[in-house]
Each structure stands twice: as C-alpha cells, then as structure tokens.
Image (cartoon, rainbow, N blue to C red):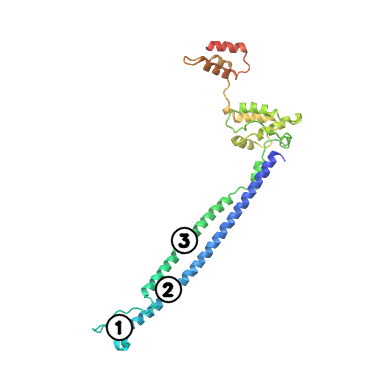
Amino acid sequence: MSGEDATNASLAEILKTMQQTMAEMAQKFLNVEKTVETLQTTQVSLSQNVSTIQSRIRSLNAGNSSGVRRTIFGSPNSLPRNAASDQTTPDGTNADIHPKDGETHPEDDNQFVNQHEQENFNQFETMREVSRELKEMRSKFHQATSSEPDINRVIEEARRTPFTLQIASLRIRDSRKLNLEPYNGLEDPKGYLAAFLIAAGRVDLNEADEDAGYCKLFSENLCGQALMWFTQLELGSISNFNELSTVFLKQYSILMDKSISDTDLWNLSQGPNETLQTFITKFKNVLSKLPRISQQSALSALRKGL
C-alpha cells in the first residue's frame, strides 16, 4: 500500500470512529433526557400526594380545633372534678388549654406541610432547569452532528488529484523520504524547486518513471496552504513535471526574490561607516545570485565599490 492509500485508509478509519462516538454520545443524551423526564413525572406524583396529605391534615386540624373549642367553652360542671379544678380560675373563667401528649398544634402541622411543599417545589424547579439545559445541549449536539461532513465526500476530496492517470497510478518502490523540509507556500518557490530537484535526484527511479516520479514526490512534499492549492488544481491537468513546476512557480511568483542583474553588482559601494568585512559579505551575497558573471567582471565591480 502506498503512502497516499495508507493516508486515505487512516482518514476513513478516523472519520468512522468519530461518527460512532457522536452516535454514542447522542444516545447517552437521549437516555439522560428520558431519565430526567421520568424523575419529573415522579416529582409531579409526589407533589400530588403531598397536596392530598396537606388537605387531610387541614381537615384533621379543623376537627381538632372544634373539639378544643368545645372543651374550652364547656361549663365546669361538664368536666371531671379534678379537670375542672385544674382548668378554671377563681373568677370562673377557663385557663389555657394545653394539648395532650401526642397532640400537635394546628400551626405546627401547617408549618410542616408548607415547608415540605416549598422543598418539593424547589426540587421540581431544579428538575425543570436540568431538563431545559439537557434539551439545549442535545439541540446543539444535533446541529453539530447534522452538519458533520459525509465520509464518502471527505475521502473523495482527499483522493482528488490533478495528475493524469499515468502519474497517479505510479508506485514508487524506493520508500526513502526526501531529506527536504515540506513546502508550505510561504517561502521563495524558486529556491525550494532547486532544493527539491537535488533531493529527488537521490531517489532510485526507473528512467521511464523519472518524470512521473518527480511529480508524485513533489506533491507528497507539500503541506499547509501549498497542499490545499495543489488539491484544488483541475483534475487531469498535470501530465508531466514541467507543467507542475510551471503552475507552481506562477502560483507563488510573488514570493520570489527579485531578479538581480550585473548592474546591481556594479552599483554596490562601501558606505562611509561600513566596515570592509560587511561590504565584502554584501558583495558576495549579490554575486552568488549571478552565476553567469565572469570572474574578471566581478573583480572590477568589487574594486569600483571600494
């Protein structure tokens, strides 16, 4: 399997794994939402039961109050002697009545019911808030997964190539990688192309496959913006390395160093505060970009600049 096929297979596997993970997460969201709905139903049922208990307690309190009033306002003769003596005052009025053991005040019962009702209401509101947040999360998750790119389309775009079938079907037997930093579309393309030709010359290619091999090696050593540019070239538009290098240089021509001529060398001169070493370094830098200039012309330009 070639490097390109291995990359496509790896990409497909990663996308399938992501799709499975998203499906599992969606199911978990659904399960949690169902659990919250069940808890809400239970909470409503409990609230109804509390309301029923509250009504019964109030009814009992109303009955107890009547009994207490009858006891309070009854005549002393209707009470047992010891009770009458304990509950009347010398002036004939009734004293305060205290509940018997095990009895509760109506106010205590109402306070207990109201407190329980408030706690129940708070819990119900909390469950509603949790349910609302879960629904929002599920909605956002659904939007993310519904816009998930189609796996087949992504793989098809990854396989997209501007090469003709002859180049695209070539399999390079030499598995050694180029000892060259990938081109990212941010540097001088002319310098990179020269470095590529030197590095690619070390790869063992059949003479018949050399041109197509250079095309494959060149495309495999692109990254970032340059790789995206390459994948957007017209399908089947590249049939040889000359066409590829031409469109490459045109695309990134703005990044090329400006052309230097003999005139640039003759115009160099040592500044008043410039050291000789600094001037010689500057002179050599310009001279290195003029491979066709004669040694005699270079020496003449150097003497003129001093």
The residue to which callout 3 is attached is: 126
Q: CA distance from mark 3 to mark 2?
A: 22 Å
The residue to which callout 2 is attached is: 54
- Packing grade of label 2 (10 A; few <14, some 14-19, many >=20) is some
In primary-sequence order, the first of circles 3 and 2 is: 2
Query: Residue at the location (51% across, 67% down)?
Result: 42
Kind of element beneath mark 1: helix
User: For the residue marked with disc 3, what is the amino acid?
Assistant: Thr
- Packing grade of label 3 (10 A; few <14, some 14-19, many >=20) is few
The residue to which callout 1 is attached is: 86
- Packing grade of label 1 (10 A; few <14, some 14-19, many >=20) is few
Q: Is residue 40 left or right of residue 191?
A: left
Q: Is residue 31 left or right of residue 169?
A: left
Question: What x and y, as percent, mark residue 264?
Answer: 55, 17
Picture layout, residue 222 above or below residue 73: above
User: For the residue marked with disc 1, what is the amino acid?
Assistant: Asp
Query: Residue at the location (53% across, 63% down)?
Result: 37
Picture layout, residue 58 above or below residue 263: below
